[in-house]
Image (tube, coloured by chain):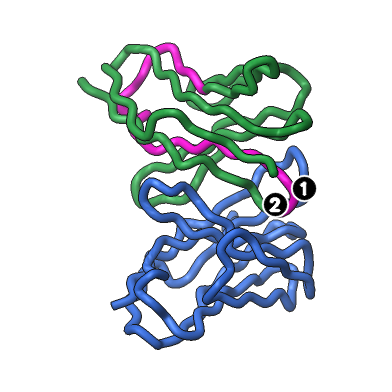
Chain colours: A green, B blue
Amino acid sequence: AQSVTQLGSHVSVSEGALVLLRCNYSSSVPPYLFWYVQYPNQGLQLLLKYTSAATLVKGINGFEAEFKKSETSFHLTKPSAHMSDAAEYFCAVRPNGGLSFGAGTTVTVRA
Amino acid sequence: NAGVTQTPKFRILKIGQSMTLQCTQDMNHNYMYWYRQDPGMGLKLIYYSVGAGITDKGEVPNGYNVSRSTTEDFPLRLELAAPSQTSVYFCASSPLHGNTEAFFGQGTRLTVV
């Protein structure tokens, strides 16, 4: 079964610093991969998705992710963190049925 | 532009009570899903539906039931509420499988006491 693992349940960064959130997938075939963001007391919003068209995927709010088949990874990055990036981030894969989510990574941004 | 709408937003239930969480979408999506979110656990799939009249179990279906009589609506039923069902519930929909993302409602926060 396809699944994803997010490394690190909490990440703290300074404003202006690099944000790096790690996601590894397990799949026997190239999967469809997604990153979602959840702000407090809200639903999930799509940041970006990998659909095999390009290995470097750009999303909203300055985020991007790179699909690396050799490492079975789909890490999310943003060059310069903003206070508004404080949220919970979920990596997800699309097997049969619904999306399968990682446990999530909470990002806090220090002024 | 409503998207996916869930009601209620908050609910407190007593053990053994029943309730229905409502979910409706106005995007004419074939696929609909129910997830529960618990701290540190991500989102777990409860049930999903690939179209009107068709439903299937997800990862954690015990204690829940669903129906899909129309494309728009996908209610989730709790028959005998238990404290373990205290959670935040999200409904989502998507047009197809594969590379299409799911669109989420704002969630229902349920507490069973």
Of residues A94 and B84, the one nearer the viewer is B84
Mark 2 falls within which chain?
B
Q: Is residue A14 above or below residue A2?
A: above
Q: Residue furthest left?
A: A111
Which amino acid, by three-letter code, is at mark 1? His
Query: Label 2, on which residue?
Result: B94
Q: Is residue B82 magenta?
A: no
**Which element type, helix, strand or loop, lies under badge 2?**
strand
Q: Write the start and end of the magenta stretch as one range.
A: A76-97
Tell me if residue B20 can be seen.
Answer: yes
Q: Estimate the spatial distance between the alpha carbons at disc 1 and disc 2, rounded to whole Å.
A: 8 Å
Work out whether residue B91 or residue B3 is closer to the camera in this orientation and state it: B91
The reply to whether the C-beta atoms of the residues labelled 1 and 2 are less than 8 Å apart is yes
Would residue B89 be found to the left or right of residue B96 on screen?
A: left
Classify 10 Å Cα crowding around label 2: few (below 14), some (14-19), many (20 and above): many
**Residue B91 location, x and y as percent?**
56, 60
Q: Are marks 1 and 2 on the same chain?
A: yes
Amino acid carrying label 2: it is Ser
Query: Which residue is located at x 44 percent, y 39 percent?
Result: A104
Image vertical order of residue A46 relative to residue A79, above or below = below
Residue at the image point whose x is 77% and y is 59% from the top:
B30
For mark 1, what is the residue? B97
* Residue in the image at 68% along x and 15% along y: A70
Classify residue A94 by image quadrant: top right
